[in-house]
Amino acid sequence: MLVNADFHVHSCFSMASSKDMLIKNMASKSKLKGLKLLGTGDAFHPGWLDIIEESTSYSGDGIYTACDMDFVLTTEVEGKNRIHHLIIIPDIDIARELSEKLPSKNKQTDGRPKTKYGGAELLELVKEYDCLIGPAHAFTPWTGMYKSYDSIYDCYGKKPDFVELGLSADTFMADCVDELKDFPFLTNSDAHSPWPHRLGREFNQLELEDISFSSIKHAIKHKDIKANYGLIPNLGKYHMTACTKCYKLANPMIAKENKMKCSCGGTIKKGVDFRISEIADYKEPKHPKFRPKYVHLMPLAEIIATILDKGVTTKAVQAKWQKLIDNFSTEIDVLINVPLEDIKKVDSTIAPAISAFRDGTVDVIPGGGGKYGQISFEKALEKPKVSKGITLDDF
């Protein structure tokens, strides 16, 4: 069966996460999104594990179910050098045992624990319990694995199970790095709130025998990921080299000469685009035969907000979003599967923008330095209008 899955999210216990990031909300909103399988996030936090047990029924083989949504235990850990790692865990008993074994001072207070363990130590620890592990948002400049290492094997010592690309990279960029040709890529949302413009903003489509940890493990190990869906990478807030204070884009070589200091006094942060160019083996991507398609999209509410030039949570935007969901069931169906002619019958103003994503004609002003890129559908609209555009900072 084909399953839409988002493995990397956070609970209400993580810093900067919404208090609404609870199982019941995550389940209901994920269904509207069109997901079938969701990571729990924060599975080393004892309090969150208690809530998972109280809020779900155990379906067997690592799957916890609530409101017809299936969950698998996942967590992000901040290790040595502030590198983030994503871990997929077989069941709650193992999660509790690993949480006790992990040396961390903040695991009782923060859903994303910090530890002095490096990638190799974390890999050895979790592999004793049949977990899956890989770098989270591998290329991002603050907490991505490649910010500190030129090779994934220098970080982990051995081969981890996957590479999570992050919002500022995609398959076309990552497949310029030769050592990644043997790795499956994951695209996940890293959501901190449960709304459909956050959950599943990036997701994976997997071929699973059934909904179980064993099937998830088999799919990742045997590279049965059938598609990756995610943002256009230059919308990511760390895609280009830019100042973290004024957000002005910077030439990476000149920035190096200036010791990564901007004329405004701020610090310039190396972008994902340039970092990949530093470690790339090819100028053009070389996709291995198993590599699935990568489809660029963005949340439906963000598309509507851009066209209306209003905030994502405004009544006008939400009304249009709800009308499309009422007619076509899920957001993913609207973005990917529903014929454009059918969408036009419901809302003729939104169809051209969805078409622009499907055919790759969206205009983008790249993001960097911590600021998301900007988008414009002016060329796609039947009646172009002047718009200041909207950023993805609401994510």
Image (spheres, helix red, strand yellow):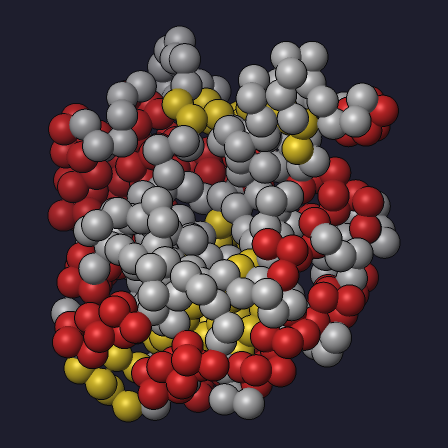
Q: Nearer the viewer, residue 23 or 392?
A: 23
Q: Nearer the viewer, residue 269 or 330?
A: 269
Locate residue 185: give its quadrant.
bottom right
Can residue 218 be seen at all in this image of the molecule? no
In the rendered image, which quarter contains the N terminus? bottom left
User: What residue appears at the point 40 percent right and 9 percent down from the top-left corner?
Assistant: 386
Percent position of residue 107, x then y: 39, 65
User: What residue appears at the point 30 percent right and 73 percent down from the top-left corner?
Assistant: 46
Percent position of residue 6, x then y: 40, 62
Examine the rendered structure and indicate whether residue 89 appears above or below residue 153. below
Can residue 145 be seen at all in this image of the molecule? yes
User: What residue appears at the point 20 percent right and 71 percent down from the top-left corner?
Assistant: 51
Locate residue 350: give its quadrant.
top left
| Furthest residue in direction top, as rendered | 386
In the rendered image, which quarter contains the C terminus? top left
Examine the rendered structure and indicate whether residue 280 appears above or below residue 319. below
Examine the rendered structure and indicate whether residue 356 appears above or below residue 139. above
| Furthest residue in direction front, as rendered | 105
Percent position of residue 339, x then y: 33, 47
